[in-house]
Image (cartoon, rainbow, N blue to C red):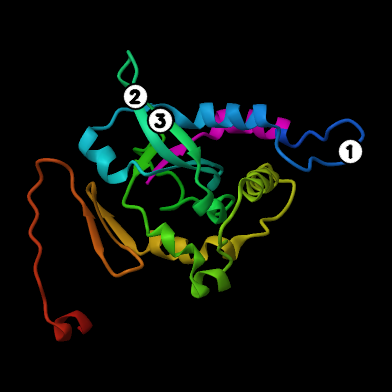
Amino acid sequence: MIVVNTEHSYQLIARRMLTPPPGATKPVTVDDSLLEELAEKTRGDWLNATDAALRVHGDYLLGTCKGRVTVAYRITGYERTELSKLRFEVEPALELTHVIGAPQPKGPWKRGEARGIRQFATPNPTQVATPENLSKGAIANADLGTWKRYVLDAAVTIMGAEEPQREPAAAWLREQWEASIDVSGVHVGSRSDGTIVVDVPAGRDVLIRTISAEEAVE
């Protein structure tokens, strides 16, 4: 999963999303031209990454603003620009509809993340339709209309028009995002199936010890 900071470009688009059409008191959907503009701003250009890193993390792309997810895309491809920047090809990630409007993964942007992009292993999104996750607000078989509605609702929340209405929707996924540590560029996280995922900068030595159940309890 790749998360990008679209703080400045997003707000201009969001204001237009929230402008009611003639004769209406509030917007009821998002115009397709604004969705195209949102995709264009979210997909790049970003700091370059290696093919190896993209093979591991290049499955989903989340835009963020003011600490919340603005939109969720599935990455279908990418290109490198003449300025050695990264530009993604994307399509709506209907299976991640429920994370739109939720707090961004790994918390607020930290010092040193000024380039506005972070990468990490994606928690298993296929579990959105399990009874446990549905009870926490995840969506089964979300369609494009629902995805658009969440994009609009996120704009309402992020731009301060309303308090967030869907905090529980991404609770199960947020728990997985937060069940991790970051030490000098090394990230250790866990997926919902119990798999431990370790991201290590290239060239760094790693020692992994196997301990007994008794040691783990201690």
Furthest residue in direction bottom, as rendered = 214
> Of the numbered discs in the image, which one, if any, rests on residue 24?
1
Instruction: Look at label 2 and name its amino acid.
Output: Glu
Count of numbered marks = 3
Quarter of the image for residue 35 reads top right
Residue 10 image position (x, y, % from top left)? 59, 32
Q: Residue at x 10, y 72 (%)?
A: 210
Instruction: Look at label 1 and name its amino acid.
Output: Ala
Of the pair 45 and 162, the residue shown nearer to us:
45
Which tag, 3 or 2, sits closer to the chain's start? 2
Of the pair 45 and 75, the residue shown nearer to us:
75
Mark 3 near mark 1, Cβ–Cβ under 8 Å?
no
Q: Is residue 158 above or below residue 32?
A: below
Furthest residue in direction top, as rendered = 82
Q: Is residue 181 magenta?
A: no
Mark 2 near mark 1, Cβ–Cβ under 8 Å?
no
Mark 3 closeness class: few <14, some 14–19, many ≥20 residues within 10 Å: many
Residue 13 image position (x, y, % from top left)? 65, 30
Q: Read off the residue under disc 3.
A: 88
Q: Residue at x 42, y 58 (%)?
A: 125
Which tag, 2 or 1, sits closer to the chain's start? 1
Whole-Å distance between the Cαs marked 3 and 2?
A: 6 Å
Q: Residue at x 27, y 32 (%)?
A: 49
Question: Dot 1 lies on which element?
Answer: loop
Q: Which residues are magenta?
A: 1-16
Whole-Å distance between the Cαs marked 3 and 1?
A: 35 Å
Question: Dot 2 lies on which element?
Answer: strand
Instruction: Look at label 3 and name its amino acid.
Output: Phe
Residue 76 image position (x, y, % from top left)? 40, 36
- Location of the C terminus (image quadrant): bottom left
